[in-house]
Amino acid sequence: MRRTRTDEIDRLLEETAASEPKRRAAALRSLCPCHIKRNERRV
């Protein structure tokens, strides 16, 4: 998986509340510190 860009974080945070479990899981994987690779207060 690629590094999560800063401009994607707000959308991914919203997707963690999606009704579809697969969308929530994908968002959570993308928000993992190993994918963000920087200190991010919102996560």
Image (cartoon, grey):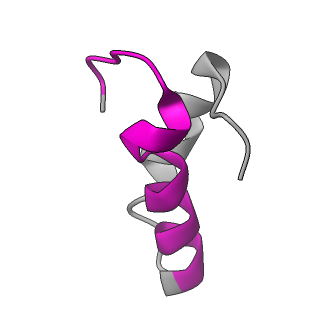
Residue 18 against residue 10 in the figure, above or below: below
Q: Residue furthest right?
A: 2
Rendered residue at 48%/72% (across/down):
25
Q: Is residue 10 visible?
A: no
> Is residue 43 part of the magenta span, yes or no?
no
Q: Residue at x 45, y 41 (%)?
A: 34
Specify whether 14 is left or right of 39: right
- Would you identify the image quadrant in which residue 8 lies? top right
The image shows residue 2 at horizontal and vertical percentages of 73, 42
Magenta range:
22-42
Q: Is residue 6 left or right of residue 40?
A: right
Residue 13: give x, y in percent of width and height. 43, 43
Residue at 38% x, 38% y is 33
Magenta segment's dominant SS is helix
Q: Nearer the viewer, residue 43 or 18?
A: 43
At which x and y percent is residue 40?
35, 18
- Inspect this view and state whether residue 5 appears: yes
| Up-down relation of residue 17 to residue 8 (above or below) | below
Q: Residue at x 41, y 47 (%)?
A: 32
Instruction: Please say if 3 is above or below 28.
Output: above
State the residue lying farthest toward the bottom: 21
13, 19: nearer the viewer = 13
- Tally the numbered discs: 0
Quadrant assignment for the C terminus: top left
> Residue 22 sits in which quadrant?
bottom right
Q: Position of residue 15 (x, y in %)?
A: 51, 56
Q: Report if residue 23 lies within the magenta region.
A: yes
